[in-house]
Image: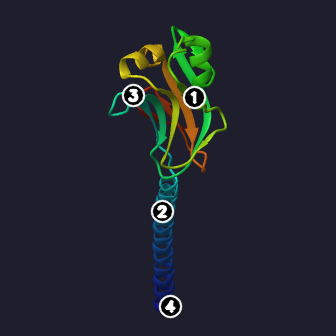
């Protein structure tokens, strides 16, 4: 009788130890699957990540000067919002509206091409948009750009990927801050 009691006790303790080991293995496997899913999700986000940059560019012969917005990322950028900070004010308008309504540059003698972006605009990957193009030399163009060229005005563009992961591009320093 005592041998059977010891055997039953040994078997029950052994079953308990095996169930605890199984539970630990299951928790470890679940953690590995969760980490793998996170890596897959990050890879998916990175495979369609837009990356906007903004700046000025002049031609080599100094006959053309432009303010450009580029998507150097691998996915499209969906414009969510555009804000311009200037003289302690916040303007919720497009860059072209700011240029024509606030800066009000008189450039009758210079040919200007304007391309506007607004909330809802989609900028494809590896696409450059020439927002303002002045067919003049750099010195005159900077006068026409006014506060955009002297950095008195700061353009902030909020944009998103196709997964709706959002970033904000702040000014010509091209600082990108993710928005959670």
Q: Is residue 93 left or right of residue 156?
A: right
Which of the pair 136/1 is nearer the observer? 136
Q: Position of residue 76 (x, y in %)?
A: 56, 48
Q: Nearer the viewer, mark 3 or mark 2?
A: 3
Extreme top residue here? Answer: 87
The tag on residue 114 is 1
Q: Considering only order in the chain, which callout, 2 or 1, is on the residue closer to the N terminus?
A: 2
The quadrant where residue 164 appears:
top right
Q: What label does residue 4 carry, if any?
A: 4
Kindly state the secondary structure of the residue where label 4 is placed.
Answer: helix
Graded by Cα atoms within 10 Å as few (under 14), some (14 to 19) or many (20 or more), the crowding at tag 4 reads: few
Place of residue 4 in the rendered image (x, y in percent of width and height, measured from the top left): 50, 90
Q: Residue at x 58, y 15 (%)?
A: 90
Instruction: Report crowding for label 1: few under 14, some 14 to 19, many 20 or more residues within 10 A (C-alpha).
Output: some
The answer to whether the residue labelled 1 contacts the one labelled 4, judged by CB atoms less than 8 Å apart, is no
Residue most extreme to the left: 60
* Quadrant in the picture for the C terminus: top right
Task: Tell me the CA gap for discs 4 and 2.
Answer: 40 Å
Whole-percent x, y for residue 28 in the image: 45, 66
Q: Is residue 84 above or below residue 102?
A: below
Of circles 1 and 2, the one toward us is 1
* Disc ID at residue 63: 3
Residue 31 is labelled as: 2
In the picture provided, is 89 more to the left or to the right than 74?
right
Badge 4 or badge 2: first in the primary sequence:
4
Q: Earlier in the sequence, mark 3 or mark 1?
A: 3
Q: Secondary structure at mark 1?
A: strand
Q: Position of residue 129 (x, y in %)?
A: 52, 38
Closer to the chain start, of discs 1 and 4, is: 4
State the separation of the CA atoms marked 4 and 3.
Answer: 101 Å
Cα separation between marks 3 and 2: 60 Å
């Amino acid at each position: 009788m005592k041998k059977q009691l010891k055997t039953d006790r040994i078997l029950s303790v052994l079953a308990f130890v095996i169930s605890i080991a199984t539970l630990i293995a299951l928790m470890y496997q679940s953690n590995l699957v969760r980490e793998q899913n996170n890596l897959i999700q990050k890879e998916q986000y990175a495979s369609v990540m837009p990356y906007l940059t903004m700046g000025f560019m002049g031609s080599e012969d100094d006959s053309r000067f432009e303010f450009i917005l580029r998507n150097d990322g691998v996915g499209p950028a969906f414009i969510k919002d555009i804000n311009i900070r200037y003289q302690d004010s916040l303007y919720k308008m497009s860059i072209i509206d700011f240029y024509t309504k606030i800066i009000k540059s008189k450039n009758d003698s210079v040919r200007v091409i304007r391309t506007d972006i607004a909330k809802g605009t989609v900028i494809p990957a590896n696409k450059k948009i020439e927002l303002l193009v002045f067919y003049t030399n750099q010195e005159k163009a900077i006068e026409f750009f006014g506060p955009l060229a002297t950095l008195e005005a700061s353009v902030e563009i909020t944009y998103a990927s196709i997964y709706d992961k959002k970033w904000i591009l702040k000014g010509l320093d091209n600082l990108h801050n993710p928005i959670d």
